[in-house]
């Protein structure tokens, strides 16, 4: 014999069966949840203005939503007068069903994001200032933590599924991704401290083809292809990650070029950074997959754009656009 609890549960299921079927029929007819929320609140307030204010809608918008609901159901739900709003018998039936079902449905759709993580890929030179601001603001808004993940790959692990969004500098050559340009960074030359060039006040972009060059071929922001084919620097050393690149420069193998911000975040006792004049700026971008992206990635992109705006230059039209080629102060 079933106990009282089983009986109550069966009765509760039987009570909600017709209500669930009615709700399913409404949704199948194109009625959306905000139409049902509006009706439910209006049935409780019995006043269009008060209900519209609580829903943050205009009164005409609420009236249109209720009219659409009535048209889909083919019955009047409200009996309107100049002074107040009453429910019709059909309105009372719908209210009785929605009052129990809709809160449960909204609760089921409310996300539980505990333990959810957004993986932010980067190769090197994590832009601490605006990026940390964006990470904090994103967590405060969504409750989802952002974990930085370093990958010595061109797309910082995005193409391999190791990251949900990636910070990438320089040109992006990949299919199936969306690139969001955040801003531009000036470039600076990195030279060995014992090199005669380290005492220079500045270097010119046009001088570099005459000097030995150190290339980070995987994740570097400056590749030999940026110069004309008949006037390119000589690759004295080719590396596959930033740490090897930095040590090759420190050893005097050649000159390297990086975004200016790196001079502040990657100090090396044997490397001096010299202002570089005439160099095209480097674009700083967020890259996200076009298919199968994290559901909150667009929220992070919007927050990152706002955070980066105060720290980065706006992108110029091209290498010869406004601001290209300006010198910068020497980094100690």
Image (spheres, grey):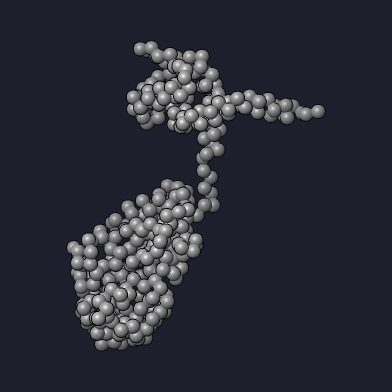
Q: Residue at x 36, y 65 (%)?
A: 172
Give the quarter of the figure containing the C terminus: bottom left
The vertical placement of 20 against 313, above or below, is above
Q: Is residue 150 left or right of residue 208?
A: right
Q: How many marks?
A: 0
Residue lying furthest right:
1
Q: Residue 298's spot in the image, x, y percent? A: 40, 50
Give the quarter of the figure containing the N terminus: top right
Q: Residue at x 49, y 64 (%)?
A: 160
Residue 215 visible in the current orientation: yes
Location of residue 82 (image quadrant): top left
Q: Is residue 6 left or right of residue 41?
A: right
The vertical placement of 167 against 48, above or below, is below
Q: Residue 179's spot in the image, x, y percent? A: 36, 58
Location of residue 330 (image quadrant): bottom left
Q: Residue at x 31, y 70 (%)?
A: 259
Residue 329 visible in the current orientation: no
Q: Residue 58's spot in the image, x, y percent? A: 34, 27
Q: Residue 127's spot in the image, x, y percent? A: 36, 64
Q: Residue at x 38, y 78 (%)?
A: 245
Q: Closer to the camera, 117 or 162?
A: 162
Location of residue 175 (image quadrant): bottom left
The vertical placement of 279 against 54, above or below, is below
The vertical placement of 183 against 240, above or below, is above
């Amino acid at each position: 014999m079933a106990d009282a609890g089983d009986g109550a549960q069966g009765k509760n299921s039987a009570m909600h069966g017709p209500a669930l079927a009615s709700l399913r029929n409404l949704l199948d007819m194109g009625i959306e949840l905000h139409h049902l929320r509006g009706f439910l609140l209006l049935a409780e307030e019995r006043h269009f203005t008060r209900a519209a204010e609580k829903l943050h809608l205009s009164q005409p918008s609420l009236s249109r939503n209720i009219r659409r609901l009535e048209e889909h159901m083919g019955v009047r739900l409200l009996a309107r007068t100049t002074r107040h709003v009453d429910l019709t018998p059909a309105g009372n039936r719908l209210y009785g069903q929605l009052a129990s079902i809709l809160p449960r449905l909204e609760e089921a759709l409310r996300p539980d994001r505990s333990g959810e993580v957004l993986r932010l890929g980067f190769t090197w030179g994590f832009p601490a200032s605006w990026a940390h601001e964006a990470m904090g603001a994103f967590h405060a808004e969504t409750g989802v933590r952002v974990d930085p993940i370093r990958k010595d790959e061109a797309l910082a692990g995005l193409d391999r599924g190791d990251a949900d969004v990636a910070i990438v500098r320089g040109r992006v050559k990949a299919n199936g991704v969306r690139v969001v340009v955040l801003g531009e960074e000036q470039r600076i030359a990195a030279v060995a401290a014992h090199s005669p060039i380290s005492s220079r006040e500045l270097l010119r972009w046009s001088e570099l083809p005459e000097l030995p060059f150190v290339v980070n071929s995987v994740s570097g922001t400056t590749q030999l292809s940026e110069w004309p084919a008949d006037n390119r620097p000589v690759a004295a050393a080719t590396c596959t990650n930033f740490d090897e690149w930095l040590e090759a420069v420190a050893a005097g193998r050649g000159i390297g070029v990086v975004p200016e911000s790196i001079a502040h975040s990657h100090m090396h006792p044997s490397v001096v950074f010299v202002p570089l004049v005439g160099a095209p700026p480097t674009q700083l971008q967020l890259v996200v997959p076009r298919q199968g992206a994290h559901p909150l990635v667009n929220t992070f992109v919007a927050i990152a754009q706002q955070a980066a705006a105060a720290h980065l230059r706006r992108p110029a039209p091209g290498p010869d656009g406004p601001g290209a080629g300006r010198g910068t102060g020497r980094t100690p």
